[in-house]
Amino acid sequence: MPIAPGMGEDRVLVRSAAWLLVAAGIVTLMFSWMPGGGVRSVDKLDGAGIIAILTGIGAWVAPWERWHPRASLGLVVVAFALIAFGDAYGVKSPYTYAVYFVVAFTWIGLTHPRRTPLAMAPVAVPFYLFPFLVGGSSDAAGMASTAVTIPVCVLIGETVAWAMEQLSASRAQAEHRALLLRAVVRGTTTITALEADQVLAAVVDSAMGVEMDCAWVAVLSRDATTWEVRHSRGDAAPPVGTGHPVDHGIPALVTASRTALTVRPDDAAVPPACQAMRSILACPVWIDGHLAAVLVAASARRDTTLEDREALSLLAGHCGRTLENAARFGQEREARQILAEVSRRDELTGVGNRRHAIALLDSLQPADAVIMIDIDHFKTVNDSLGHEAGDRVLTALADHLRTGVRDADLVARYGGEEFLVVLRQAGSGATHTADRLCATWRDSGTHTTFSAGVAVHRAGRRPAETVADADAALYAAKRTGRDRVCENRVDASA
């Protein structure tokens, strides 16, 4: 639709008419007082000039944006009247009279939609005839020219209106394409998360950015039997969690076509809430060559275009590639976690190894307790029963310690037959826990015992000092008969 006053981007064209009216009024006043101008009625011509100036000033300051676009046609009526009045009471100009009507109809075509010039033709006819009728005698040739002049004016006005409509449509299309491009660029730059849910939420938000009224993404279940809505935007979109069999709904249509498609709102596959939409687009989301999700977007205000479809397909394609990256990232992260876990596990006993033990000690906080445990006479076990028997004892003790504390990750094999246990915020109660572990091990029927040393970590001390205290307590337990627990008591103020 061409620019219309009150609806266009500005009031440039209306103000151009205002300037023309003011200029015409000034020229009329100057011409009416020009000596030898041949003016028929100076008073009437002066009145016409003043009316033109006042009308132009009013048109300049008028709030056209508040009024209907056709309100500016009132200026055209005033222009018709002034042209006719000037020709009737000014200087008769048969060679230029019709040109003024052509200018007026051209302005109508510039500022109003098609068929408006045609509608204004009956209004223009009496004004065009006015100069030929005043004065009591008629000009047959001038009146006959009406049959040619007014149709030509209408033809020119309609041609200009058509050209403006095409220009406006082209501009709207270009603006829409620019909007789609911005939305796609924004989508491809924001859909960068490495979590699947974040990716799906971002692609739905990006789909709304291409002037859609609702959008959602349906994800295929792991067993490929159902579709489930994961993310949705807009009142007409199905709520999150909505599911249906794999052979039903819009995703089933996409599965059959294996490409992006436009879905009729009255199609049985369309959810009831979305059937009031004007146009619906659906695009597949491929992950590693498999259809994993379907992106759906709908508009209630306009018919979607090929550009909309291509933009949504680009978003869906980028979504699939990002999900592929997210899956690979997840696999790599899981592999790294497993590798890190393995690198900190003792192969024989399954508890933490020395690297894990050092990490535990580095994380000590005040009131954490360290228990150092050593199997009594372990060399004798190896010498008399063999190393396999010794390995079984080590494995059994590791299982005993792991099940005897709240967090199995707080147990580590410190080296050889020596184990370390960290008790978080145990304080003075750590000795009781160590005594319990020692007693239950003694009663387990393994025919071995262990000695333990306990030290509580204090504020301001280094972890190495606490470990040294626990070692000292362990050696004290060894010296005093083994199969017992000793605590290294450190003054908290030290």
Image (cartoon, grey):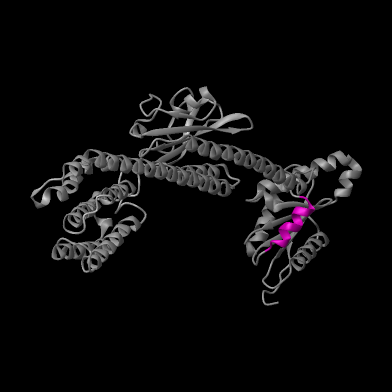
Of residues 375 and 128, the one drawn nearer to the viewer in this rendering: 128
Which secondary structure is most common in the magenta stretch? helix
Q: Can residue 443 be seen in this view?
A: no
Q: Is residue 487 magenta?
A: no
What is the quadrant of residue 119 in the picture?
top left
Residue at the spot 29% in from the left edge and 63% down from the top edge: 23
Residue at the spot 64% in from the left edge and 65% down from the top edge: 367
Q: In this view, does 67 lie above or below 32?
A: above
- Judge from the rendering whether residue 319 lies leftward or rightward of residue 396; answer left or right: left
Q: Can residue 414 be seen in this view?
A: yes
Q: Does the magenta stretch include residue 356?
A: yes
Which residue occupies the extreme right position in the image? 383
Picture quarter with the C terminus: bottom right
- Judge from the rendering whether residue 337 lies leftward or rightward of residue 99; answer left or right: right
What is the quadrant of residue 43 in the picture?
bottom left
Picture quarter with the N terminus: top left
Over which residues does the magenta segment extend?
Answer: 353-364
- Judge from the rendering whether residue 123 lies leftward or rightward of residue 186; answer left or right: left
Which residue occupies the extreme bottom position in the image? 493
Of residues 32 and 386, the one drawn nearer to the viewer in this rendering: 32
What is the quadrant of residue 61 in the picture?
bottom left
> How far across and how far down the image is residue 155, in percent?
31, 39
> How far across and how far down the image is residue 293, in percent?
53, 33
Which residue occupies the extreme front position in the image? 36
> How far across and how far down the image is residue 180, in percent?
49, 44
> How far across and how far down the image is residue 384, in percent?
90, 42
Q: Is residue 33 above or below residue 159?
A: below
Of residues 340 and 372, the one drawn nearer to the viewer in this rendering: 340
